[in-house]
Amino acid sequence: MLENKNTKLTPINTFGEFELINHLTKNFTIKNSSSILGIGDDGCVIDSHKKLSVISTDLLVEGVHFDLSYVPLKHLGYKSVVVNLSDLYSMNAKPNQITVSIAVSNRFPVEALEDFYDGIKAACTKYNVDLVGGDTTSSTKGMIISITAIGIIDKKKLCKRSGAKNNDLLVVTGDLGGAYAGLQVLEREKSVFKVNPNVQPDLDSYTYSIGKQLKPEARKDVFELLESLNIIPNAMIDISDGLSSETLHLCKSSKLGCHIYEQKIPIDTEVISICEEFKFNPTTAALNGGEDYELLMAISQSDYDKVKNHPYLTIIGYFTNKETGAKLINGLNEQIDLTAQGWNPISKKI
Amino acid sequence: MLENKNTKLTPINTFGEFELINHLTKNFTIKNSSSILGIGDDGCVIDSHKKLSVISTDLLVEGVHFDLSYVPLKHLGYKSVVVNLSDLYSMNAKPNQITVSIAVSNRFPVEALEDFYDGIKAACTKYNVDLVGGDTTSSTKGMIISITAIGIIDKKKLCKRSGAKNNDLLVVTGDLGGAYAGLQVLEREKSVFKVNPNVQPDLDSYTYSIGKQLKPEARKDVFELLESLNIIPNAMIDISDGLSSETLHLCKSSKLGCHIYEQKIPIDTEVISICEEFKFNPTTAALNGGEDYELLMAISQSDYDKVKNHPYLTIIGYFTNKETGAKLINGLNEQIDLTAQGWNPISKKI
């Protein structure tokens, strides 16, 4: 889990609570003019300049949301930030600040937390957000991460889940199922490693999918693209729990049904190979796999020409009236009910 | 830990993740006009009306920050909110919204979480804040709570830790040491209970201190008082880690020293009795006990007449230049260095 396994490690209790925060965040500088006051007071202060503030928060628990036996801490820090930024982009908001709180048990040396914060810093730099607050404390077991992301938006551009209209195009960014395929590969390598720690895995043919799992990106580029194309989606959501679950969220909030064409769902060829190797259906990976952090949006038919051939965007179906229900249309033109079998930590793990 | 121990209990996996959030938050209504969008999208949306946003966040871990063997879940919910609101009041900001995320293991039935959210709701009602977001997920062990509070402030009224001036009055609200004294009583009762579960404790003579520990209040009244007295403190902090630690924060951030007069430190008579019973020094409880959530502020000498005899406020000393250091002056007029021995989960528990 650590970047450098050879150095002499420093127990956390070398630092007090306040010194540890200072130590871990000393290389973070404030870059956004809206960040009025950062770490060091009881709260951070943000100037929204007459815009609305959008706030998203996530709680990640070791053993439930991540497995440190194959997730490097630097990647974990990066991903923890990215998943929150993705929530803001999915509302068409521009992220500007994050707060990061962590609780760790005594199995984590200071260097482990430094790796984690290196990942946080890399994400802050890439997405141009400021770390403005947070907490470090101890846990009785494992690592717990809580991140809050703060962004701004013009009232007119806000994308809620509830704004989709009948006949709107259902558009998805990038491709789906990759993060789930990558997870399968990593889980297999973990099992192999347990049996024989000397086996060196050859992961070259899985790099795209493993990357989607370990180091996903939020679609800042799509946020900027929508602005440049002058498109405001009627509704938007990010795909954290799988296409099926997120589509149902949009349908439920907007009181609509939809048709999704199975053959339109974008899936990378590497993901299809992994699905063949692991004997599961690529469509299932896209529908129920989750963690792709692509954006799913409802776009007016009048914007069809702007999106139809864009390499970042795929039209996979359209919204219908509520009575039609949410349907997947397969290659045989059969209509199958969409059901939410997304990744659900409550029902799966408890 | 549960309010009603006799009802038939419902396992959490009766609900999916989204249904559980909906179930727990169905009685929360939005009351503040600044809460544009609450639970149900990827983020909440807040309109700061040209003011600055102030944001504070806390991560609380069972076994580190709270012990459910004597903390009822309803009180825990209430206190979790209050400690975050206290952070905002300490910056002279008005809290308007909170987000609440929890992770729980399968030992918690739905009714336990309902009790917790009842406490959250009671705090929302008392302090007039809206619950606008959050997360429920599972943990491998125990309960983890992450709360973010969002407030607003006029730029001119913002109180940072760094604003104290040489000669400013050091003023504290309420009285100190109560939460620590209450904790000692509760810890003793827990030990007695372990030996003989049939002993009914008589806690009548400890009610004030136990209340300070289990159900602290944030000083909304003082926030309003400062406004009505037309006082803007030069610096302010809330007392979560003890008077000593917080005073040192103000001194360090403001690059000053201070004199605190031991005999001026306000301590309730019940707290003094408990200190006698448990054989510890009341001043130590006030300096290092923590969790009192009173406010500590630097107030200009020109405001002396406004604060000198106010029942909510006590002048306990004044700021000096940095070279003087931070000193406690005892009854023999001896100067003792203030040291931070505040409650520190990193160094204590790891």
Image (tube, coloured by chain):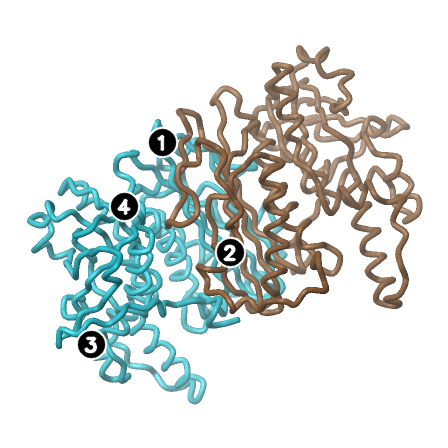
Chain colours: A brown, B cyan
Say the numbered circle drawn on residue B33: 1
Residue at 79 percent of width and 31 percent of height: A328
Q: Nearer the viewer, residue A8 or B239?
A: A8
Q: Nearer the viewer, mark 2 or mark 1?
A: 2
Q: Secondary structure at mark 2?
A: helix
Neighbour class for label 3 at 10 Å: few (<14), some, many (≥20)?
A: some
Mark 4–mark 2 distance (CA, rounded to whole Å): 23 Å
Q: Secondary structure at mark 1?
A: loop
Mark 2–mark 3 distance (CA, rounded to whole Å): 39 Å
Question: Are callouts 4 and 2 both on one chain?
Answer: no
Three-letter code for the amino acid on which mark 2 is drawn: His
Q: Secondary structure at mark 3?
A: helix
Mark 4–mark 1 distance (CA, rounded to whole Å): 31 Å
Q: Which residue is mark 2?
A: A23
Q: Are marks 4 and 2 in contact (CB under 8 Å)?
A: no
Q: Which residue is mark 3?
A: B272
